[in-house]
Structure formats: structure tokens, C-alpha cells
């Protein structure tokens, strides 16, 4: 008798060499390589479902995917993490494999997602590809004033990539703050969900405030416009990290 068990796979990856998480034609993605490794290891076709999608070049310190795995005699298979990692390239690492309830869903059950965007100001070969190099330090106080205004709203159409197939552009942001680090600055943001390109568009807009190109209060008109062209330029993907995904049962 064959039955299926559902597993959550916790992983992290360096997005530099990938066209994001989601499988795409004619492009190498993280999901494609994970599915291939699981299929090879378990000797059955495996298709994972991710907790979301990261764009080309974006990194993930914490990412979850779920997969249904056929077992024999109703006994869940023991999936060996080391064997799975041996089948993956060095820039993708499986951290945990968790047996969950059959209806658990990596995407729809996530209650909170957190991102960080890293910026540095002195040329550093070890930050290249993992942080964005800027010449001048922007005004963090003004950017945090603008970030606080963003948290008052829920409709973020102005920060969304155009022509995306989503039912709503509403998100509940619970944290948005800039912090100074030893060698740069980092923007931290948490919400129940994010739109495509949303974080990079927010960072670009807040930087325009920090550079004195507009006052913090201008954010209100930008959000009210629901027009992507009114917001700032999207910053490069290299500085963006998905850092945390939360579930009520993990």
C-alpha cells in the first residue's frame, strides 16, 4: 500500500547564480535543483512548493518548501539531510527536514516574512554581490520617519511590480526600520506577505528621502497614487535577503 507524507524542507541559498526560486523555462533556479536532488535521492518524481518566490540574485537565509513523498505501508520515509545536501551545489544548503500534517502549506500557512537589505560605503571585495555599495551615507533619521509612515498603510500597489497576478496588493507591515551597522546600514522589514519587487522598491524610495530628494511626508502621496512610477527606483538584488519565515506550528 502506498501513502504520501508531507515534509517541510528548511533551506538557505546564495541567489547570485540563480534566476530566483521558482522554476522557469531556460533559466536555472533553486527550486529546479532542489526538485532534481529530491527526485534523485528518493527515486520518485518530487515537485516542491515554496513559501514564496525570490527574484533573480536575491538571497535567502531562511526559506521553506514543502513536498509530498510516497511511502510504503503508511510509514514516512526517513529523508537523509546529508545525502540530500551532497546532491546540491555549495550555494544551496538544506538545514532541516520536518514531517508535517498532510494539509500543511509552506506558502499559505506562513504568518510572517522578514527581509533585510544591506548597504555598505567602502569598497570591499568580500561584500561584492552580497551588499550594495553606495558612495554617501543617507540621512537615517529621515528614512526612519518615512518608514514609520509606510507602516500606517496596507495597500502597496505603488511598490509592486506591474502586471502581477495577485488578488490583492494589501499587506500588513509590522516592522520597518533602518539600522546602522559597523560598516554600513541595513533595512529590516517584516510583514504577513510581500508583493513582487516590493522591498527593493521601498528601499529605493526611502533612499530618495535619505538623500534629500523628497521629504518623508511625500511617502503618503506616493502610496495614495497606487502608481509604481511615482515611487523610487528599485535597488539591486544583491543586497536583499529573506531572513525569516514564521509558522504557527513550527
Image: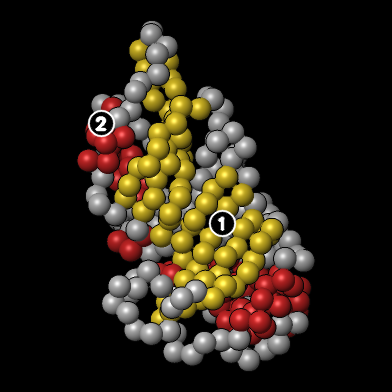
Q: Quadrant of residue 44?
A: top left
* Mark 2 or 1: the one toward you: 1
Badge 1 crowding class, 10 Å Cα cut-off, few under 14, some 14 to 19, many 20 or more, is many
* Horizontal arrangement in the rendering, residue 147 relative to residue 84 (left or right): right
Helix, strand or loop at disc 1? strand
Residue at point 68%, 65% (across, down):
156
Q: Which residue is mark 1?
A: 114
Asked if residue 30 shows in the view, the reply is: yes
- Which color scheme did the rendering employ for the protein? secondary structure
Label 2 SS: helix
Where is residue 1? Give x, y as percent: 38, 8
Q: Badge 2: how crowded within 10 Å, few (<14), some, or many (20+)?
A: some
* Residue at numbered disc 2: 41
The image quarter containing residue 231 is bottom right
Q: State the quadrant of the C terminus.
A: top right
Q: Is residue 26 left or right of residue 187?
A: left
- Cα distance, mark 2 to mark 1? 31 Å
Q: Position of residue 203 (x, y in %)?
A: 56, 74
* Residue 177: image location, x then y, percent: 63, 69
Residue at 56%, 86% in the rendered image: 138
- Report whether residue 230 is seen: no
Image spot of residue 132 (x, y percent): 42, 77
> In the drawing, what numbered circle is on residue 122?
none
Q: How many marks?
A: 2
Amino acid at each position: 500500500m502506498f501513502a504520501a507524507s508531507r515534509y517541510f524542507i528548511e533551506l538557505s541559498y546564495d541567489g547570485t547564480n540563480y534566476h530566483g526560486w521558482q522554476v522557469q523555462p531556460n533559466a536555472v533556479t533553486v527550486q529546479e535543483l532542489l526538485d532534481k536532488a529530491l527526485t534523485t535521492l528518493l527515486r520518485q518524481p518530487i515537485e516542491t512548493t515554496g513559501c514564496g518566490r525570490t527574484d533573480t540574485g536575491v538571497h535567502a537565509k531562511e526559506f521553506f518548501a514543502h513536498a509530498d513523498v510516497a511511502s510504503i505501508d503508511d510509514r514516512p520515509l526517513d529523508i537523509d539531510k546529508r545525502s540530500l545536501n551532497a546532491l546540491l551545489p555549495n550555494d544551496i544548503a538544506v538545514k532541516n527536514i520536518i514531517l508535517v500534517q498532510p494539509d500543511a502549506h509552506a506558502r499559505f500557512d506562513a504568518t510572517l516574512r522578514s527581509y533585510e537589505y544591506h548597504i555598505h560605503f567602502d569598497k570591499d571585495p568580500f561584500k561584492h554581490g552580497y551588499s550594495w555599495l553606495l558612495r554617501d551615507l543617507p540621512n537615517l533619521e529621515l528614512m526612519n520617519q518615512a518608514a514609520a509612515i509606510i507602516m500606517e498603510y496596507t495597500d502597496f500597489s505603488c511598490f509592486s511590480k506591474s502586471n502581477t497576478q495577485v488578488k490583492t496588493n494589501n499587506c500588513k507591515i509590522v516592522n520597518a526600520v533602518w539600522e546602522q551597522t559597523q560598516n554600513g546600514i541595513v533595512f529590516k522589514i517584516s510583514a504577513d506577505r510581500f508583493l513582487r519587487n516590493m522591498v527593493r522598491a521601498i528601499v529605493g524610495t526611502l533612499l530618495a528621502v535619505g538623500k534629500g530628494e523628497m521629504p518623508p511626508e511625500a511617502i503618503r502621496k506616493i502610496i495614495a497614487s497606487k502608481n509604481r512610477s511615482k515611487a523610487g527606483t528599485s535597488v539591486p538584488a544583491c543586497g536583499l535577503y529573506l531572513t525569516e519565515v514564521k509558522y504557527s506550528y513550527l
